Amino acid sequence: MSVFDPSESSLAAPSEGQSWLERIPIAYWVVGLILLIMPAIAGDFMLFQIFGWTFILGLIALGLMFLGGYGGMVSLAQMSIAGVGGYMVAIFGVSAIDTISLGWPWYVAIPIALIIAMLFGTLTGWLAVRTEGIYTIMITLAIAAAFFYFARQNYVMFNGFSGFNGVLPPMLFGVDWRGPAAFYYLTLFWAALGYLVVLYISRAPFGLALQGVRDNPRRMSALGYNVTAHRVAAYTFAALLAAIGGILLTWQSAQISPGTAGIGPAIDILVIAVIGGMRHPVGPFIGAFIYVILKTYAIDALVTLGLAGERFQLLIGIAFLVIVFWSPDGIIGLWDRLREDRKRDPLTGRGGEGP
Amino acid sequence: MNADLNGGSTISERLGATGTANALELKGVSKFFGALAALSDIDITVRPSERRAVLGSNGAGKTTLFNCVAGDFPSTTGSIRFFGEDITQFPPHERIRRGLRRTYQISLLFTGLTVLDNIFLACVGVSRSRFSFLRPGRDDALMASAESLVRVVHLEDAKDEQVATLSYGQQRQLEIAIALAGAPRFILFDEPAAGLSPTERSELIEILIGLPAHMGFIIIEHDMDVALRVAESVSMMHNGRIFKEGSPAEIEDDPEVQALYLGGEDG
């Protein structure tokens, strides 16, 4: 019942006199600066493939972190919702499949895509919140599987097996948003925005109440909260994050097909969230980075070692096992423990609780 | 056994409550767990400003009664009216939003949050900002009412402390502050004095007596002294039934009550 992060300050405005700018921890400045000047350091492949993909998968997994970490609900349908977002942009906007795509301008197609994806997420939540624990996972997995097969077999709307190609971001402000640096900043912007919004909401009434619902639904009900409505609303918000990620993902590969939202990718999102850690919104991005690095370089590493390259999933699996074994809270959990250890008195072994 | 009850005169009728709606009106409320009748055929009427104690041995069904009234689980039969409105089918949060409050015997507090945050969460729960995505600002009205509730239960010194670090007595006080959040019209106190030291006990009595005169409540209490000091009427429960209602003096003098409650051979 005490999973509220005690290290976070109280709701009441903490240190008076300090401006909000001064209260931003130094780590944020450092990481923020590095991320901003990254295009000057990193090559095109790094920017577009590694970081772009990290931010996108991180954003989709962020929705799962919000549901799982704050709401105690583990959903495997996040990738399907992302898929719906991507498909809708292709269907309502422009793609190479002009017999299906309606070709509406981006400022109409994107809002429609987001709304439909959120409706899909809300419906998923409405079904899933009636269950708990393993059954939530099962029902959302069933929804993910159903969406995958539906998209693969439906040719009227989803163009079946091949899906849509030629789905490109709009040429806004005369910028080609699929250029490496531009796409890097585009995905960085949405990832950072998503991160900050989740962090902010975690201490706003909605987020606090969600954590209350996770820790003690009966009590929340006795405080006047509609527990079911709160949980469903959390799914809706998580769906918005997934939908933004899904649209960016579609633009990155310029295509969307059933495989994008298959069972494998659905589970990958869970793996990402668990590797990174579900307790803090930074977790999914750390998890996504590790996942992307492994997925990109594992083949080369295996081949160098004289092993078959197609076994790269094995490496991801092993990494997952190692991290879950050493720290059930993911990488953030490891980090927290290291910090605790450093604060501990080396002689007495006591302390560890900062001021 | 409860023939005298069904015969007509409840304590409220004798006290002359007519006309306006009663705070709480239970008719024929029963609760079965399988074949076990935890409550059978309960009739209770409580006026809006009435302060009623419910006494009875362990397993008499007192907390089950609260659970049915607050909606923690539904009653099997019967009807429950709250200020005239039939709330029998309402989920708990709808009952709370109508001004019903309850405290829990086993504290269900958010131990990782501070005292103030716990009360704030309760204030938000009965407000319209339940789904607010905005953090409370410096002059937030709900935060201000949370602050004032902290003072009502004398927890000013502990308001920024995590609930996990509070003493048991302080946690009980916090329970009461949470029950007072928003605009309560009627409160169910489930053994608020259980496990308190004598000093804490008298502090609690002070808080209860100090509640606004219009605010009625039902208090479950094992300690006769506490119950009889804060309550003006008493219902005695035994084996899921109410078998006696009356003023504290009547109850204390009743031979049947003395046999059951003070002689107490069964639990």
Image (cartoon, helix red, strand yellow):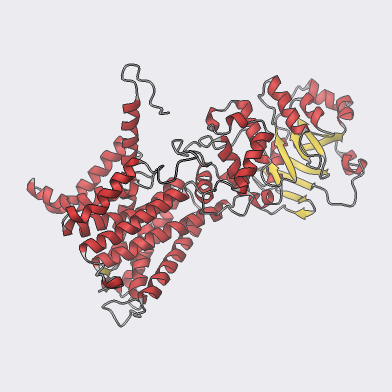
Residue furthest to the bottom: A99
Q: Position of residue A151 (x, y in %)?
A: 34, 69
Q: Taking A173 as reference, is B205 left or right?
A: right
In the depicted structure, whether residue B108 falls above or below residue A314: above
Q: Taking B46 as reference, is B64 left or right?
A: left
Residue A186 quadrant: bottom left
Location of the C terminus of chain A (image quadrant)? top left
In the depicted structure, whether residue B249 falls above or below residue B82: above
Q: Taking A236 as reference, is B91 left or right?
A: right
Residue furthest to the front: A17
Residue furthest to the top: A347
- Residue drawn at x 80%, y 53% is B84
Q: Position of residue A193 (x, y in %)?
A: 38, 56
Residue A261 quadrant: bottom left
| Residue nearest the viewer, comparing A147 with A38 | A38
The answer to whether residue A128 is seen in the rendering is: yes
Q: Taking A23 as reference, is B190 left or right?
A: right
- Residue drawn at x 81%, y 37% is B51
Counting labels gives: 0
| Residue nearest the viewer, comparing B43 with A49 | A49
The answer to whether residue B267 is seen in the rendering is: no
- Residue drawn at x 53%, y 32% is B162
Q: Position of residue A111 (x, y in %)?
A: 42, 70
Q: Position of residue A240 (x, y in %)?
A: 42, 61
